[in-house]
Amino acid sequence: MGTIKDFVSIYHPLSPTSLRKFEKLFTKKNFKKNDVLYRTGEASSKFFIMVDGFARSVLIDKNGKEKTRSIFKSPAIFTSLISSLNAEPSVAEFNCLTDVTLFEGNFLNFIELTKKHHDISILYNRCLEEAFINMEDKATILSTLNATERYLHLKERIPDIENMIQLNHIASYLNITSIQLSRIRKKIFSK
């Protein structure tokens, strides 16, 4: 997958006219591992369609400790919705866990297209539905599964995740320490 059309086909097909208008919103960009896409406290209307790589949203607590809120595996679409819709500072930072290829667009321009093109509006709804399902899934996992079960659930979704991103980011996403993750992995892989 490497084009806007490829990404759109996952969610909802667009008419040729709508697809051309949607594609015009974006600029293709390449980022390196650890590059920041969106800073905490930044008010911006950027949104991203990632076609290659891994990124994350991270919260920084009052002690300066990072907490990985979400891990995005391509193909993925993401933004700070609060910032994009309300021009408020983002509470999260978005950064690259690997080298990343993405399309960057203006969210407010996207919203304007949804008002004029029904198929683009449906695409937006499908993306929001997926985001909500992912948030609901993570909340359920964090509240009902123990640390080992959370790790195994993540491994089901992304089997070779340890070969792609740093273990400390995985641990943070799972809401455990790196030491806990090492113990879990040792126990699982020693069987």
Image: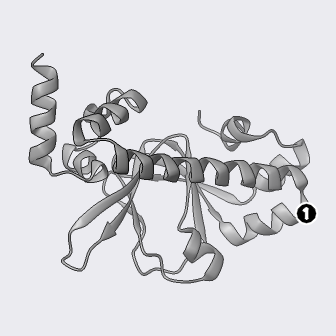
The structure residue drawn at horizontal position 88% and vertical position 42%, both measured from the top left corner, is 16
Position above or below: 40 against 148: below
> Could you tell whether 129 is left or right of 165 in the image?
right
The structure residue drawn at horizontal position 9% and vertical position 36%, both measured from the top left corner, is 183
> Could you tell whether 124 is left or right of 62 in the image?
right
> Could you tell whether 59 is left or right of 166 in the image?
right
Q: Is residue 83 visible?
A: yes
> Which sits in the foreground, 123 or 45?
123
Quadrant of the frame with the C terminus: top left
Position above or below: 69 against 40: above
Position above or below: 101 against 10: below
> Which sits in the foreground, 54 or 189?
189
x and y percentages locating residue 7 in the rendered image: 66, 40
Task: Say which element carries label 1.
Answer: helix
Instruction: Give the image quarter of residue 157.
Output: top left
Q: Count the numbered circles shown.
A: 1
> Which sits in the foreground, 50 or 32?
50
Judged from this view, the residue extending furthest toward the top is 191
x and y percentages locating residue 169 in the rendered image: 26, 50
x and y percentages locating residue 29 in the rendered image: 52, 54
x and y percentages locating residue 86 in the rendered image: 63, 81
Label 1 crowding class (10 Å Cα cut-off): few <14, some 14-19, many 20+? few
> Could you tell whether 166 is left or right of 26 in the image?
left
The structure residue drawn at horizontal position 75% and vertical position 69%, both measured from the top left corner, is 109
Q: Which residue is mark 1?
A: 116
The structure residue drawn at horizontal position 35% and vertical position 50%, both measured from the top left corner, is 142
Q: Coloring scheme of the render?
A: one colour
At label 1, which amino acid type do we have?
A: Lys
Quadrant of the frame with the N terminus: top right
